[in-house]
Amino acid sequence: MRRYEISDHAWHRISHLLPGKSTDVGRTAKDNRQFINAVLWIARSGAPWRDLPERFGSWNSVYQRFRRWAKKEVWQRVFEQLQEPDLDWLMLDSTTIRAHQHAAGQKKQQQRPKA
């Protein structure tokens, strides 16, 4: 697997959400994974669309497809599927968390008077 490419685990989690399946109306997309990898390359590298490597195809085609998916809210569904659990509601009980022995009890240094 190359740098910036989607993992097999993540791909299996989202592949059923993407347009272009054989059951969808219209054209079947055989290269959805390559397209996702192209978008990840742009997102992670921070490069402009025109600098997309040729192995992903025409930068303009990839960009236009990215925009179509954005308008159809495909990316929203993908992000919701890949989202990690919301940890804002996580509660910790301090009786089960131990502090390091040096975490408490250090004496404060006294400041010297300025001359």
Image (cartoon, rainbow, N blue to C red):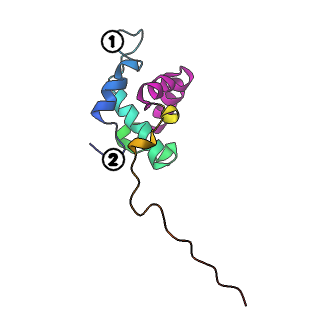
Three-letter code for the amino acid on which mark 1 is drawn: Ser
Is residue 73 positioned above or below 40 on the image?
A: above
Q: Are marks 1 and 2 in contact (CB under 8 Å)?
A: no
Q: Say which of 110 and 3 sits in front.
A: 110
The residue lying at 52 percent from left, 34 percent from top is: 88
Magenta highlight range: 58-85
In this rendering, which labeled residue sits more in front, label 1 or label 2?
Answer: 2
Q: Say which of 2 and 28 sits in front.
A: 2
Percent coordinates x, y for residue 89 in the rendering:
51, 32
Percent coordinates x, y for residue 60 in the rendering:
49, 35
Residue bearing the label numbered 2: 3
Q: Residue furthest bottom?
A: 115
Three-letter code for the amino acid on which mark 2 is drawn: Arg
Q: In the drawing, does residue 24 fall left or right of residue 88? A: left
Q: Say which of 59 and 101 sits in front.
A: 101
The residue lying at 47 percent from left, 22 percent from top is: 77
The residue lying at 40 percent from left, 38 percent from top is: 38
Residue bearing the label numbered 1: 22
Percent coordinates x, y for residue 84 in the rendering:
43, 32
